């Protein structure tokens, strides 16, 4: 199984809502990532988890809260978002964060988020 | 800090023809990996090809090949016998060796249009 799955595919939420994005992989990868991608732009790294511990937080606002309950699952909890947070949110995984070949990241299809 | 530059925001090619997408990067490291990712419209980002910096031989994957010029820090992607399904946004990405915490540095992307 070489797939990263993400749910939901689409999400519309108001600025006062609380919602969560979910990402799952069963490739035995120990590193998982959240990216934000605006239209026709490259993905911007938000968070990196390694062995279920947060390794990198790229100065992301606290209204985004990541969680890694186990090695296969990654969540992104959303609260009090702004309209400018509307974007495609991509999850990815890789074998490890050790660099080199381990950087080969497998991406999920993304969740398209609209904040009203 | 590493930077990746894709100087062609858009490219087009006729079906069955060959097209080359450019990518240059800047790094002071000697151990690194380079990737080309493809993101079709509204579809998943997938890895097209990977090149290890320590390998002199250019990577090839079926109709996709790279021209890796380490001294010039250039990493172009050649697509031969272009097909309609090759239409997508292509991102060049750099991954450091060693402890890079899984970070990939992406270029700004090149939108490839394939004309029938």
Image: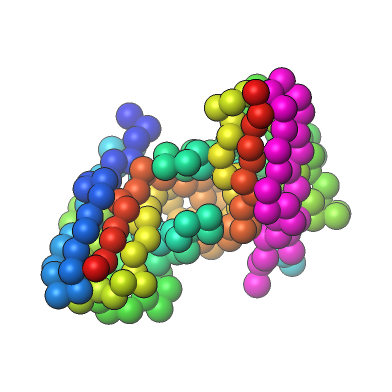
Please say whether residue A55 is visible from this viewpoint: no
Q: Quadrant of the C terminus of chain B?
A: top right
Farthest-out residue, front: B116
Q: Is residue A56 left or right of residue A24?
A: right
Residue in view at x 37 percent, y 32 percent: A2
Q: Is residue A75 left or right of residue B105?
A: left
User: From the viewer's perspective, is residue B80 above or below residue A44?
Assistant: above
Residue in view at x 75 percent, y 34 percent: B19
**Which stretch is magenta?**
B1-26
Q: Quadrant of the N terminus of chain B?
A: bottom right
Residue in view at x 53 percent, y 55 percent: A40
In this rendered view, identify the residue nearer to me: A56 or A108.
Answer: A108
In this rendered view, identify the residue nearer to me: B18 or A100.
Answer: B18
Please tell me whether residue B19 belongs to the stretch shown in magenta.
Answer: yes
Give coordinates of residue A82: x percent, y percent: 29, 75
Give coordinates of residue B21: x percent, y percent: 73, 43
Q: Is residue B68 left or right of residue A14?
A: right
Q: Quadrant of residue B107?
A: bottom right
Give coordinates of residue A54: x percent, y percent: 32, 67
Please tell me whether residue B65 belongs to the stretch shown in magenta.
Answer: no
Farthest-out residue, right: B71
In this rendered view, identify the residue nearer to me: B70 or B107.
Answer: B107
Give coordinates of residue A85: x percent, y percent: 34, 69
């Amino acid at each position: 199984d070489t797939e990263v799955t993400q749910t939901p595919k689409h999400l519309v939420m108001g600025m006062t809502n609380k919602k969560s994005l979910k990402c799952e992989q069963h490739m035995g990868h120990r590193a998982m990532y959240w990216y934000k991608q605006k239209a026709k732009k490259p993905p911007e790294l938000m968070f990196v988890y390694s062995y279920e511990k947060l390794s990198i937080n790229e100065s992301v606002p606290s209204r985004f809260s990541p969680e890694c309950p186990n090695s296969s699952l990654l969540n992104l909890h959303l609260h009090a978002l702004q309209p400018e947070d509307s974007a495609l949110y991509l999850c990815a995984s890789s074998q490890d964060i050790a660099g080199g070949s381990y950087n080969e990241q497998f991406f999920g299809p993304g969740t398209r988020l609209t904040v009203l | 800090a590493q930077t990746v530059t894709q100087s062609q925001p858009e490219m087009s090619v006729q079906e069955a023809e060959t097209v080359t997408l450019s990518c240059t990067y800047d790094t002071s490291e000697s151990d690194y990996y380079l990737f080309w990712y493809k993101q079709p419209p509204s579809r998943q980002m997938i890895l097209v090809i990977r090149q290890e910096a320590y390998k002199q031989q250019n990577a090839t994957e079926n109709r996709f090949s790279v021209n890796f010029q380490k001294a010039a820090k250039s990493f172009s992607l050649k697509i031969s016998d272009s097909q309609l399904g090759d239409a997508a946004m292509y991102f060049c990405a750099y991954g450091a060796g060693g402890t890079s915490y899984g970070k990939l540095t992406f270029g700004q992307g090149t939108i490839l249009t394939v004309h029938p």
